[in-house]
Image: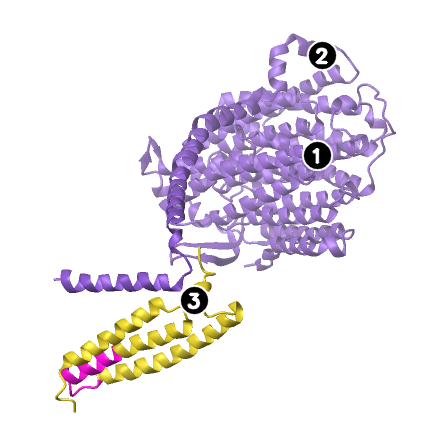
Amino acid sequence: MSTGIPVQYFLVLATIMFFTGIYGFLTRRNLITMLMSVELILNAVNINFLAFNRYLYPHKLEGMFFSLFIIAVAASEAAVAIAIVINIYRRFATINVEDVNEMKH
Amino acid sequence: MINFSYTIWIPLLPFFMFIFLGLAGHKYFPKLSGILGTCGLAIITVLSYITAYKYFFTTEKVDGAFQKITAFNTTWLQFTDKLHIDLGVLLDPISVMMLVVITTVSLMVHIYSLGYMKGEKGFERFFAFLSLFSFSMLGLVLATNIFQMYIFWELVGVSSFLLIGFYYQKPSAVRASKKAFIVTRFADLGFLIGILILSFNTKTFDFISLTDPSGTAITQGSGIGFLGLSIMTWSMIFVFMGGVGKSAMFPFHIWLPDAMEGPTPVSALIHAATMVVAGVYLVARMFPIYALAAPVALNIVAYVGAFSSIFAAIIACTQTDIKRVLAYSTMSQIGYMMLALGVSGYGGHEGLGYMASMFHLFTHAMFKALLFLGAGAIIHAVHSNHMTEMGGLRKYLPITHITFLIACLTIAGIPPLSGFFSKDEILAAALHHNKLLFAVEYAVAGLTAFYMFRLYFSVFWGKETAYHHTPHEAPATMTIPLIILAIGSVLTGFIPFNQLVTSDGRAFESELELMVAIPSVLIGLLGIGIAYILYKKESAIPDKLAATFKYSYKWAYNKFYMDEVYLFVTKKIIFKLISEPVAWFDRNVVDATMNAIASVTQGVSFRIRGFQSGQLQKYGFVFITGAIMLAILFIYLWK
C-alpha cells in the first residue's frame, strides 16, 4: 500500500500528463502522435480516478471499475482511430492533419 | 316483410362497372365498353322495376301508409358511440320513384350514346363516367342519412364536372365544367352548414328519425331562436341553399346553360332529368321538417321556385342555341317543382303540392330527356346548335320530328299527355295557397308553350335552309330511346301518384279541377298559337317585335346580365376589395417576416462560416479552451 505517498503527488503527476497530452494534441501535426496524446489524456484521468478511489473510499471499487472501463474504451477507440488513419492515408497519401481539411465550409 | 337487401346492388353495380371500365376499358375493349356499361344499367333497371313493384304493390301498409324501409345499413365512420356516419339503402315512396326515373333515363341515355358517341375519342371514358354518375345519383336517392346524401351529392357534382368537361381540349368546355363545379360547390357550403346546424341540434343524421313528425327535430327544433327565426328554420334555409345550387335555381343558376358544353346525352341525363332535380328531391326528403317546423324556409322555397321559373322562361324565349333554350326550360320547370313543394302542406289533401311536385319531377324527367335526346339527334344531323341554321327539318328527320312534337306538346300541358296532369296539380296547389304564385305560374305555363313551339317551329318548319349535305335520320340506337321516352311521356300521366307518392305516405283523393285545367290548357294553346303565327313560316314579325322592345329584348337575350353581375361581384368587389388586400398582406407581412428571418440567418451564417476551417486542431483548441473556461466558471463563480 502506498501509505507514504500523499495524494497531491498523484494529482500533480496526472495534471502534468494531462496537459502534456493536450499540448501534444494541439501542436503535433502527425495523426498517430495526436492519437498517442489522446491516450496520455485518458491515462491522466485514470490516475486521478485510482488516486481518489484509494484515498477517499478505500473500501469501494467504483474508481477501479471506471479505470478498467476507460482502458477498454481507449483500446477500441485506438482501433477505430487507426483504421481511420489508414483510410486517410490511402485517400490523401499523407497523415499530416493540416492537409486533411476537406470538411471546411 | 319482404326482403329488400338485394337493393344494395342497384348502386354498387354501376360502381364496379365504373372501376372496371375506367381501369381496363381503354386498354382491352374500347369498342365493347359501351355495350358492357349499357348491360350493367339494364340489369339495375330491371332490379329497380322489381323493387318498385314489390314496394308499391306487395309490401303491407301500416295504418294505410307506406313505410320507410331501411333495406341495408352499415356503420361507415364510427367517431364515438353517438356520432357515427352510416351508409345504407332507404326505401320509401320518393326514393323508389327516383330509382325508376334514374335507371330508366340512364338506360335510355346509355343506349342513345352507343349511337351518338360512336367513334368519339374517349368512348370508354364516357361510359365509365356515366356509370360513376349513375352510382352517385342512386347512392344519393337511396341515402339513409343526410351525411351519406351529402357525400353522394358531391360525387354527383364531380361526375357532372367530368362529363361537362368531357371534351377537355375545348377551352369553353373546360371553363363550363369549372364554372359548374365552383358554383355548385359554393352552394354546397351552405348545405354543409345546414347539416351541421341540424344534426348538432337534433343529435342525429338519420332521415327516419329526422323526418318523424313526432320526433325531436320537429317538435323541439323550433324553440331556439336567432335573428327572429328558429334554429331549425336557419338550418333548413342553409340546406335549401345546397338544393338551389344543384337545381340551378336563381341566383345559382348561371352554371346550367354553360353546362350544355357537355355531350348532349349528358345534358339529357344529368342536366335535365336527374341531377338537377336533386335539389327538389332534397327538399322533398326533408319535407316534414320544412312543413312542420320551418314554414318560413318553405315559403322561401316557394318564392325562389316561382321567381326562377318565370325568370328562366323569359330568357328561354330569346335564346337561339337550341340546347340553351332547353336548359332554361329545365330551370323553369324545376322552379315549378320547387314552387309546388313550397305551397304544400303536410299530410292528406294538404300535401297536394308535394305530390304534384314529385309527379312533375317524374313526368319532366321523361319529356325533358326526350327533348334533349331529340335535340341531340338534330345536332347530330345538322352539326350545329343554332336555330338560325335550321329549318324545314321535318322531312329529313321524321322520327325525331314526331317524338319532339310529342315532347313539346307534353311540356306545353296539352291533355292527355303527362305534362298536363302534373302541371295541373301544381297549379291547383298554388291556387289554394297563394294567388300571386298562381298567377306567376299561370304566366309561365303560357311562356313555356310559346318558347317550346318557337323552338319546334323554327327547327322543323320555318324557312328552308340549304344544308351542306342532306341531313339524315339518326341510327336505330338513337331513335329507339326517343320512341320509348315518347311513349313514357304520353303514358306516365296516368300513374295515380296520389295513391303512391304522398307527403305522409297515405293515399288521398284528388280530382281534376276544371277551374284550373281549362284555363291552363287555353293559355298553353295561346302560346302555341302565337309561336305558330310567328315562326311557322319565315316572317319578319319576330325581328320587328324584337326591335320594338329593343331594351327588354336585349336584357332577356343577355340573360338579364346575371353573368356580368357575377363577374362584377367576384372581380370588382371580392377580388379587388378583399382578395387583393389579403394577398398584399400575405406577401408583404407574412411572407416578409419569414423572408427576414431567413435572410438574417443567412447573413449571420455567412459571416461565421470562416470558423469552419476543416482544421482538426483548431476545433480541438476551441473545444479545450471552452472546456477550461467552463471549468473556471464552475469553480470560481458557481457558488
In x, y percent, where is residue B227? Answer: 33, 31
Chain A: colour as depicted: yellow
Q: Quadrant of the N terminus of chain B?
A: bottom right
Q: Mark 1 packing: few (<14 Cα in 10 Å), some, or many (20+)?
A: many
Q: Residue at x 19, y 82 (%)?
A: A51
Calculate the distance from the C-alpha at mark 3 to the C-alpha at mark 1.
86 Å
* Foreground tag (3 vs 1): 3
Q: Residue at x 81, y 34 (%)?
A: B399
- The residue under label 2 is B543
In x, y percent, where is residue B479? Answer: 79, 39
Q: Which residues are magenta?
A: A45-61
- The residue under label 3 is A97
B288, above or below B528, in the image: below
Q: Circles 3 and 2: CB distance less than 8 Å?
A: no
**Residue B372 picture quarter:** top right
Q: Mark 2 packing: few (<14 Cα in 10 Å), some, or many (20+)?
A: few
Mark identifier at residue B372 = 1
Calculate the distance from the C-alpha at mark 1 to the C-alpha at mark 2.
27 Å
Residue most toward the bottom? A1
Q: Quadrant of the C terminus of chain B?
A: bottom left
Disc 3: host chain: A
B424 is within the stretch colored magenta: no
**Residue A96 picture quarter:** bottom left
Residue B298 horizontal side relative to residue B515, left or right:
left
Lower position in the chain sequence, tag 1 or tag 2 = 1
In x, y percent, where is residue B604? Answer: 37, 46
In x, y percent, where is residue B56? Answer: 59, 49
Residue B304 horizontal side relative to residue B522, left or right:
left
